[in-house]
Amino acid sequence: MTWQSRAWDRRSLQFEALLAYNERNRNARGHGANGGLFMAVVDAHYDPIIQEELVVWGAGEDVVARYRERQGRGKVSKTTWCRLDGKELGLTVGYDDVKTIKVVEHGNGRAIITGRHNGQLSLLSAEPDNFGQCIAQFGPVPKNTPQYSEPEAINSLDITDNGSKRLLAAATKSTLRIYGIPWAGDVEAEPLTTYNLREGTVISSSERLGGARWMEQGETIALAVSGSKDALRYLSLTPTGWSQHVAAKSERVEREFAVKYDRTISPNSLEPVYMHSGAKRGTSLLLSSWRDGTIRLQDLRTPSPFDAIYQDNVDPWSNAESLMSYGTERFVAGAANGPTIQPFMTLPNDHPTGRARCNLAKGLPCHWHELSRSLYFRPNAKCYLSDSLRTYRTNSVWSLARASDVSSSFYIGLSGGVIEATLEQTPETYPPTQPTVDPNFGFEDWRAASKVGPGYKAKMLLPSLMETGDGYSFKGNDRSILLPGLLRYEGPRELPHLQAKLVKHHRLDIGYQRAEDFARDSD
């Protein structure tokens, strides 16, 4: 994974949007800046044997899939698109929209589990020959109710597989239902267990279960509860059944990072953190995003040395809607207020100290500013995509997904489409003399226009990058600071007057490098 680690360190990320241009959905949903745009929820899967990547997303009442198979270095990938048309099934815009989606292995193939706003939970075939064919329904099957009433919408799905059993957790506004995944077709699977948050406890009528994630090999389920002073909770499995607990609260974290636990949580943000990417053993470490702008890494059961609080050091009030972790090395946050992606480094490194005394006007730089003078210091960064997506510039990033732990791409679900983000290094010469994507797992032709499916258009995005500090929250984050420069990606170009060694060792991808970066070193 050395190639990918280097690309991450240099912020070598490129983006392509797959946007729906079907006006039927827009006209039925309404108008406005983002009116008529569905909220895309996305998931992905990778088959290492045939080297095929599958990405699926809910596009309103429809389900869209793209299959892409590597054919070898220097060869064109085999790409296939499939679509399940909800209108043909009698589904309506808005009321029957897909709210959450998961890809699972099923028999000798793959299947998709979809949870809809109308409460319908289905297991569908994900094989191209019979894509969208219903394998099973998960009960209780919702009854036909007036569309002006509020259905028992499926807010989140998660699957655990510890080798001996596979279980599905489906969260609605007040209940958590746990199912086994049926192998046979044409069945109605009833829940193995149903846990009602309102039974046996006094809670506010405004409290709603927004999301649930499996932890600790299926022994624990993390819960995000909106409208509650105890927004982060978990269920633990006991001999008598499931019992509900409030997540551990650390006095050290409250004191060190000046945060409280009674703020609103982002229900889509729950993300388990494994000790290293690829390890799927049980973990009690969880990332969650909160509306006060913090992203919190904590042990659900007890306070631990791993507990930490992350935050944008430039705009500390911006909050994340969704999160995706890469072991304990890094995680990616999707913004709640625009098409923006922010990678955070989580490994302990030269953690800046003494920022509270930072005063550049008085000549008192902190440790972080001292490190920032070096080309080799790599602070966290934020990738802004709004310049290329002006119509979508107020959209939230509803979901993030990657096909496997070795994938060099990940997918971003926003209103109106999906963005593919790929680790791709800007070549020093053009045409490039070396591969610009991961030579082992990347798709060299990932930007080929021929791969776009019916009803969609592809658009390359030019990101702008801002370096935002070490990413740790601290008491002085709300203080005014000098706004870092915004670096617009300029693509491959020749820089003959710069020293080749410095270009290669610059902390950023060559597409973000500027001549003034080397002024002091060249003198």
Image (spheres, rainbow, N blue to C red):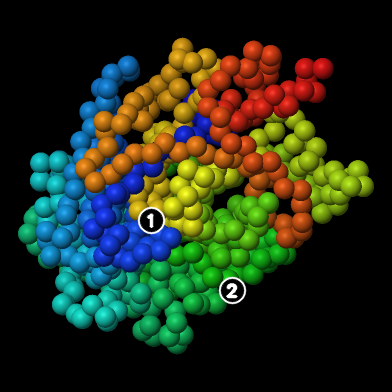
Between residue 517 and residue 73, name the one nearer to us.
517
323 w.r.t. 148: above or below: above
In this picture, residue 411 sits left or right of residue 230: left
Can see residue 283?
A: no
Q: Which residue: 43% across, 25% down?
A: 437
Q: Which residue: 14% across, 47% down?
A: 131
Residue 178 position, x and y percent, is 27, 66
Of callouts 2 and 1, the N-terminal one: 2
Asked where in the image residue 410 lies, by quadrant, the reply is top left
187 w.r.t. 106: above or below: below
Q: Which residue: 52% across, 39% down?
A: 463
Q: Which residue: 56% across, 33% down?
A: 489
Residue 188 position, x and y percent, is 12, 65
322 w.r.t. 344: above or below: below
Q: Residue 415 carries which label?
A: 1
Q: Residue 262 carries which label?
A: 2
